[in-house]
């Protein structure tokens, strides 16, 4: 079961596509975070979803929100995919332990071996303020991000 709104978001430290360590706690007191779980790099729905986010980065920047994509892919796969698609935001590898962060957030699909499409908007104090999950095979709409961003208070 996915974590609920108004609960503390579990901290994590994962490697992004450039080999840098990204921790949720590094944003505490600084800015809010949009944590976007997606199943797999290079897949059709994931590519179209993250390309839509790439094309709407101003939504996040204007709200003072750090966008972080997260999947069970290796950082090397994420880098190749990110460069191919021109993603200008962190893609972090929930590679080992396999899906560990997705499990903490309650969105890991054991039978599939990857995370569901789930988004958590976490405020600067580390509290989940908005979240949404779509059914398998169903992309998230940019309107859902707009609505979720409106739930956040500036840092």
Image: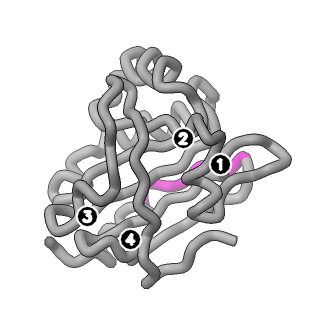
> What is the spatial separation of the Cα atoms under label 2 and label 3, in whole angstroms?
20 Å
Q: Quadrant of residue 112?
A: top right
Q: Label for residue 32?
A: 3
Q: Nearer the viewer, residue 114 or 131?
A: 114
- Where residue 12 appears, x then y in whole percent? 43, 54
- Residue tagged by mark 4? 147
Q: Residue at x 49, y 43 (%)?
A: 70
Is 45 positioned to the left or the right of 88 in the image?
right
Q: Residue at x 38, y 33 (%)?
A: 16
Of pointers 2 and 1, the one earlier in the residue sequence: 2
The magenta stretch is 137-143
Q: Secondary structure at mark 1?
A: strand
Q: Is residue 57 above or below residue 132?
A: above
Q: Is residue 129 above or below residue 12?
A: below
- Where residue 36 appears, x then y in whole percent? 47, 51
Q: Main secondary structure of the magenta part?
A: loop
- Residue tagged by mark 2? 94
Q: Residue furthest bottom?
A: 6
Q: Nearer the viewer, mark 2 or mark 3?
A: 2
Q: Nearer the viewer, residue 86 or 122?
A: 122
> What is the spatial separation of the Cα atoms under label 1 and label 3, in whole angstroms?
22 Å
Q: Nearer the viewer, mark 1 or mark 4?
A: 1
Q: Quadrant of residue 21?
A: top left
């Amino acid at each position: 079961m996915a974590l609920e709104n108004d609960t503390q978001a579990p901290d994590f430290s994962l490697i992004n596509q450039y080999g840098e360590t990204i921790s949720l706690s590094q944003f505490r007191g600084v800015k809010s975070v949009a944590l976007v779980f997606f199943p797999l790099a290079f897949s059709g729905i994931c590519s179209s979803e993250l390309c839509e986010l790439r094309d709407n980065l101003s939504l996040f920047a204007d709200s003072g929100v750090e966008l972080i994509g997260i999947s069970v892919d290796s950082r090397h796969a994420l880098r190749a995919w990110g460069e191919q698609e021109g993603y200008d935001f962190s893609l972090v590898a929930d590679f080992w332990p396999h899906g560990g962060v997705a499990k903490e957030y309650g969105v890991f699909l054991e039978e599939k071996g990857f995370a569901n499409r789930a988004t958590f908007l976490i405020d600067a104090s580390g509290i989940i303020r908005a979240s949404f999950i779509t059914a398998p095979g169903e992309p998230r709409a940019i309107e859902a991000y707009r609505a979720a961003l409106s739930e956040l208070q500036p840092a």
